[in-house]
Image (cartoon, rainbow, N blue to C red):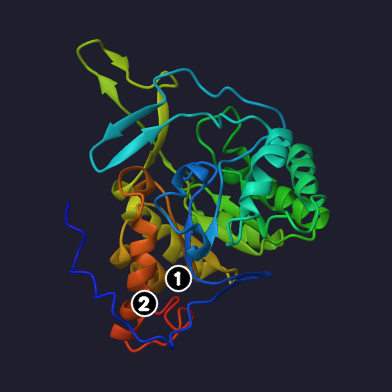
Amino acid sequence: MPHGPEAPSPTAPTDVDLSVTLGRLQLPNPVLVASGTFGYARELASLVDLSRLGGILPKTVTATPRQGNAPWRTVETTGGMLNAIGLDNDGVDAFIECHVPYLASVGCPIIASVAGKTREEFVELVRRFDAVDAAHRPAAIELNVSCPNVSGGVDFGSDPALCEAVVRDCVAASDLPIIAKLTPNVTSIATMAKAAEAGGADALSLINTVLGMAIDWRKRRPLLANVVGGLSGPAIKPIALRCVWQASQAVRAPIIGVGGIANINDAMEFLVAGASAVQLGTVNFYHPTASMEVLDALPAALAEIGATSVSAIVGSLNH
């Protein structure tokens, strides 16, 4: 699949400022890896220099262990992947005990991803991380209010009042920066962005997966046991770009662009559209060193358009 013009040479000046400010969250650079696509970081440590990343979002954790949905839970599609994992995880207790110490040692900011069934559960999850000792505490928390593969998963991301309320409750419950991850499966992404901003979110992540399905027409059955799943990968990049641009026109809160980003050209498009940082997701499955390649190419890409910092090009789209 073509990815646009040839990527810039990684050779670049060394005086380019890659640092990023997302509300109260400071990151060394804008290249992050998305929750659910990077495991708990250990899995990619032999391939990726974790210390160079702008941030790692480990797998979303819930208050109690979840087995997730029945198989099939993933299906490859044209230009992307459908998943209906269902937030399979061992729960917040196991995450804090087994994974947080390692994650705190990798040398880059860690942003914990949490999902609750209720406002109270979201708040309790946020408080659990706020209570972690300072040496192991994450740099921020991303509220997954937009998972399409669990019962009630998108309620907080599709109802503006609920979204604003859960964000506000979590901001009040923690000293950590709070990021709201929003779904594209809504009538107006700008409305949801405004709601999350009104709740006090330090930043917004756009987008989570797009609802889709796959069918075996010979058997006349859906391929996913959950029937529908979340589409990710290059196929959703135009949708994600549109959402980032629309949200950036509606709010002042910083935006993290997510959706189909696989190379430096993709990343630059999101920055110009209005994102202050990006998360690489599905590409980690089929090209796990992509984050390093994007990071290597970023200074030259900025220099190519006369920019000496990431912030200089954020939202610079001419229209």
Q: Is residue 283 above or below residue 67?
A: below
Provide the secondary structure element on which disc 2 rests.
loop
Q: Is residue 190 above or below residue 299?
A: above
Q: Which mark is residue 317?
A: 2
Q: Quadrant of the C terminus?
A: bottom left
For image coordinates 25% across by 43% down, the residue present is: 79
Instruction: Locate residue 23 relative to residue 137 in the image: left or right.
Output: left
Residue 293 quadrant: bottom left
Q: Earlier in the sequence, mark 1 or mark 2?
A: 1
Q: Is residue 239 above or below residue 306?
A: above
Q: Quick one: which residue is furthest to the top in this view?
A: 219
**Can you give x and y, in whole percent of width and height, for residue 72 in the image?**
39, 20
Which of 253/5 is in front? 5
Q: Crowding at label 2, few (<14), some or many (≥20) Cα neighbours within 10 Å?
A: few
- Residue 319 appears in view: no
Instruction: Locate residue 178 relative to residue 107 in the image: left or right.
Output: right
Q: Amino acid at mark 1?
A: Gly
Residue 224 quadrant: top left
Q: Are marks 1 and 2 in contact (CB under 8 Å)?
A: yes
Label 1 – label 2 distance at C-alpha: 8 Å
- Residue 232 appears in view: yes
Provide the secondary structure element on which disc 1 rests.
loop
Q: Amino acid at mark 2?
A: Leu
**Can you give x and y, in whole percent of width and height, for residue 104 in the image?**
65, 54
For image coordinates 28% across by 22% down, the residue present is: 215
Q: Which mark is residue 274?
A: 1
For image coordinates 74% across by 50% down, the residue present is: 165
For image coordinates 31% across by 49% down, the residue present is: 287
**Can you give x and y, in whole percent of width and height, for residue 17 in the image?**
48, 83
